[in-house]
Image: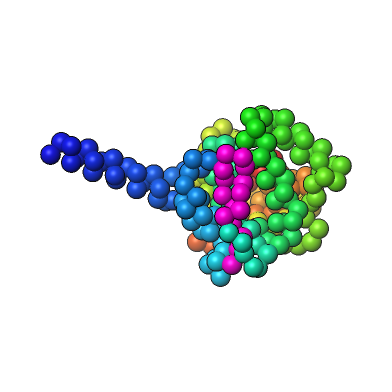
Amino acid sequence: MKRFLLLLVAGTALCAAQNPASIDHVDASTPPEVQIQLALSAAPPAVSQHATVYVLSRTGYVKAREGNNGFTCLVEREYPTSMEPECFDRETSNTTLRARMYLEAERAKGRSDEQIQKEIEAGYKSGRFKASRKPGIIYMLSDSNYVFDPSQKKIIHFPGHLMFPAPYITAKDLGSEAGNGVPYIVAPGTAQALIIVVPAGHGSSNTSSQEHKHD
């Protein structure tokens, strides 16, 4: 009887560990099937079911399947302990996503985020990496968004939202800081700047722009 109970507990724990709704971070040891489910949860099925999908491996991101609509879905990690399922459109798949993939490839080599981010910043200046060249969208509508909040200095759950590339945009360009109906800006003033809009029903309108950080 004891042995049965132990097996039951172990089996339940294993299933829970592989259930996307039960985890708040991923790494190279996370089963590809779980990563794929999380990645696809970022966008509406009409978009994600036709998207290319990448999963995190011990060498960085590797392609899990080929899509046919120009979108790319994966679980991004601004920090090794954060988890951000995202689906990039065709333009951002060919521009800013390449810097995100470089980040994970270099992390896999044991390099520090500080070193890598400096290289990425220099890469945008040199032309190695390119900012989005036209309006587009990055879906982040998953319920499994766990992002770093600089004000609380910890990982928090963030509601599903839409992100619109706006290279080098600042709060001044929108007329005011976030709040009072003004959209949030992530990484203002940089090549990777994004305007964030939380659709009705996806979270509180009082969520601070500082709660979602992209370097």
**What is the basis of the colouring in this image?**
rainbow
Q: Is residue 186 left or right of residue 53?
A: right
Q: Residue furthest right?
A: 126
Instruction: Give the image location of residue 88, x and y in percent.
Output: 66, 57
Q: Residue at x 24, y 41 (%)?
A: 7
Instruction: State the extent of the magenta-drawn residues as a range.
Output: 50-64
Give the quadrant of residue 214.
top right
**Residue 148 visible in the current orientation:** no
Quadrant in which the N terminus is drawn:
top left
Which quarter of the rendered picture does the C terminus lie within?
top right
The structure residue drawn at horizontal position 57% and vertical position 39%, both measured from the top left corner, is 58
The residue sitting at the bottom extreme is: 46
Comparing 179 with 44, the one in front is 44
**Is residue 67 shown above or below 184?**
below
**Residue 61 is a magenta residue:** yes
Q: Is residue 99 above or below residue 154?
A: below
The quadrant holding residue 114 is: top right
Residue 149: x percent and y percent? 58, 38
| Residue 92 screen position, x and y as percent | 72, 56
Residue at 53%, 40% in the rendered image = 28
Q: Is residue 137 above or below residue 5?
A: below
Horizontal arrangement in the rendering, residue 158 relative to residue 89 (left or right): left
Q: Which quadrant would residue 132 be assigned to in this image?
A: bottom right
Q: Residue at x 64, y 58 (%)?
A: 72
Residue 3 visible:
yes
Q: Nearer the viewer, residue 90 or 59?
A: 59
Residue furthest to the left: 1
Q: Main secondary structure of the magenta part?
A: strand
Q: Is residue 167 magenta?
A: no
